[in-house]
Amino acid sequence: MDPDRQKRAPICEALERFRKKRVVPFDVPGHKRGRGNPELTSILGQQCVSIDVNSMKPLDNLSNPISVIAEAEELAADAFGAAHAFLMVGGTTSAVQTMVLSVCKAGDKIIVPRNVHKSVINALILCGAIPVYVKLKIHPVIGVALGMEVDALKEAIADNPDAKAVLINNPTYYGICSNIKELTRVAHEHGLKVLSDEAHGTQLYFADGLPEAGIRAGVDMAAISMHKSGGSLTQSSLLLIGENMDRAYVRQIINLSQTTSASYLLLSSLDISRRNLALRGRESFAKVIEMSEYARDEINRIGDYYAYGRELIDGSSVYDFDVTKLCIFTKPIGLTGIEVYDLLRDEYDIQMEFGDIGTIMAYISIGDRMQDIERLVGALTDIRRLYKKEGEQLNYVDSVIPKVVCSPQESFYAEKTTLPIEKTSGRVCGEFVMCYPPGIPILSPGELITDEIIGHILYAREKGCSLQGMADPAADTLRVLEGIRA
C-alpha cells in the first residue's frame, strides 16, 4: 500500500471542484441541489443535497468508470491488497450476488455453509445454481453454527467433484472464523473458485491481532461491508477480486442489476472511508479491539451472561475468532436474546445490532466510545437484577439444518399453496423464513419443513423475533410447493 497515494480521495475532490463551479442543473435529480425540496434540505443539510448529483463527464460513471471513480477503485484495491476493487452502491447484498453470479450458472453446484446470508440463496434463485451444504458443528452451549472445517470441505468436494465454487463466511455474524487459508488452498487444488462473504470483516484488513482477511488468504472474490465497520454510509460496500478473476466480466455481472443512477453520497463516503482506514485504520481498530475486550470482561463479571471470545478457538471448527464481535449469550438469565434486546431499547435507550433466540450483539466500531460501553454494562447489570428468571429450554436459529429437496430457483417459481404453519410438516417450503437480523434463513425455498423447524419458528415468533421473507407478515401461514412431499 502506498501511504502517500492513499491521501487522495478523487471522487470527493471532483465533487468539490464541481460544487465550486455553480453549474446550472437541467438534469436529474429533480430537487435541483435541494431548492425543490426544502424539507429534505432541512433534514439532510445543504452540504449533503448539493452533492446529490447525476453522473456526468467530470464525475465519471460507475457503470463504466474511466476517471475519478476508476482512480477511487484503484486506491481501494491498493488499500485492501486486491487485484481490483469495485465500488458497490447496492449494499453487500449486491456484492455477494455478483460473486455467485460470476462463477455459477444454471445447474452448477456451489458449496456453502447453511448459515449463509439470504443474499446467497437469492443469488441461487437468480442463476439457478444448486447449493451443497457443508456440514457444520453446532456449539453445545451457545447453540450457533461454527466454522467450515477443512475435512468437511474435502468431504463435500469428494461427494460433488463437479462443484464450481465454495463460499466461506469470514467471519460469521457471531465472530467465528474458519481456516480460510487452508480452505482456499484445498478448493483451488480441486479447481474451485473461492468466495468470501466478509460483510462483517472490513476490520480484518486494517488491524493487528485479528483473523486472516480473505484476499490475503488467496480467495478469488471478497464482499466487504464498508458501511458496517468501515465508517461509510449505509448501503455502500466494496467487491474485491484476485488476480484469477476476469475484471471486465465481473463488471458486466455487476451491471446486470446495479443502478445506472449511482448515488454520489454513497460513492464519496466509500472514497473518504477508504482513505481514513488506509491512513488511520490500524490505530482506530486497535481501540475497537480494546473496547470490545474490556466490554467482554466486564459483562462476564456481571454473572450469568456469557460474552464469548477467543476461548472458543479449537483450531478446527473455530479456527479463529474476531474479538470485535461482542456477542452475549443470554440463556442463563432465563431470557432470550430478543427479550434482552427489547429491554435495552425500550427501557434503557440502547440499540443493539440484533437479538435472536439465544444471543444479543453489540457492534463495536470506530465510532464507539468507552462511556457507551459502560452504559451497556450498567444496563445489562440492571436487567439481570430486575428481570432474571428460571431458564427454559431455548432453540437456536443456527442449529436447524434443513434437508434440500428442490433447487432454490425451481422452488421459488413453482406453483404453491398456502397452509397454516402448523400443518406444513413434510411439505417443501416455497419461500424464506428468517429472523432479521441476522438474515440467516431458518427455511429457504426448496427445503423440507419438519416439526422441529415449525416449533422453532413459532417459538421465535412468540418471543418477538422479526420474522421476514414470508408472504404472510404475521407468520401464521406458509407457502409450500403444490403436490410435492418429501
Image (spheres, rainbow, N blue to C red):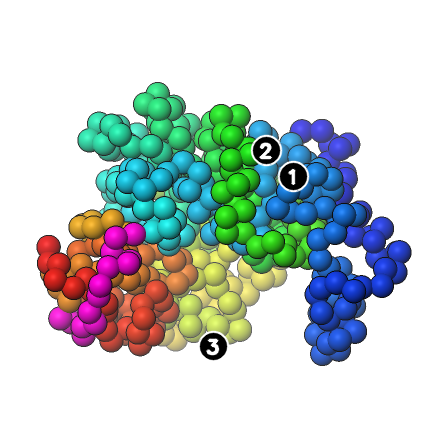
Residue 68 in view in this figure? yes
Helix, strand or loop at disc 3? helix
- Residue 195 among magenta residues: no
Identify the residue shown where x is 35% and y is 21%.
189
Q: Which residue is mark 3?
A: 346
Residues drawn in magenta: 409-423
* Residue 442 visible in the current orientation: no
**Amino acid marked by disc 1:** Glu
State the residue position of label 1. Answer: 73
Q: Which mark is residue 84?
A: 2
Amino acid type of disc 3?
Answer: Asp
Which residue is depicted at the point 53% across and 25% down? 243
Q: Nearer the viewer, mark 3 or mark 2?
A: 2
Work out how far the residue at label 1 is from the one at label 2, CA to CA, in angstroms.
Answer: 7 Å
* Mark 1 in CB contact with mark 2 (< 8 angstroms): yes
463 sits to left or right of 214: left
Query: Would you place residue 28 above or below residue 230 in this image?
Result: below
Q: Nearer the viewer, mark 1 or mark 3?
A: 1
In the rendered image, residue 416 lying in the magenta stretch gets the answer: yes
Q: Name the residue rendered at 62%, 34% in the picture.
A: 77
First along the sequence among labels 1 and 2: 1
Q: Where's residue 409, x and y in %? A: 29, 52
In this rendered view, identify the residue nearer to me: 152 or 484.
484
- Label 2 near label 3: C-beta < 8 Å? no
Residue 139 place in picture, x, y as percent: 27, 47
Residue kind at label 2, given as amino acid type: His
Quadrant (top left, top right, bottom left, bottom right) of the N terminus: top right
At x 48% / y 58%, what residue is drawn?
Answer: 362
Q: Earlier in the sequence, mark 3 or mark 2?
A: 2
Q: Which secondary structure lies at badge 1?
A: helix
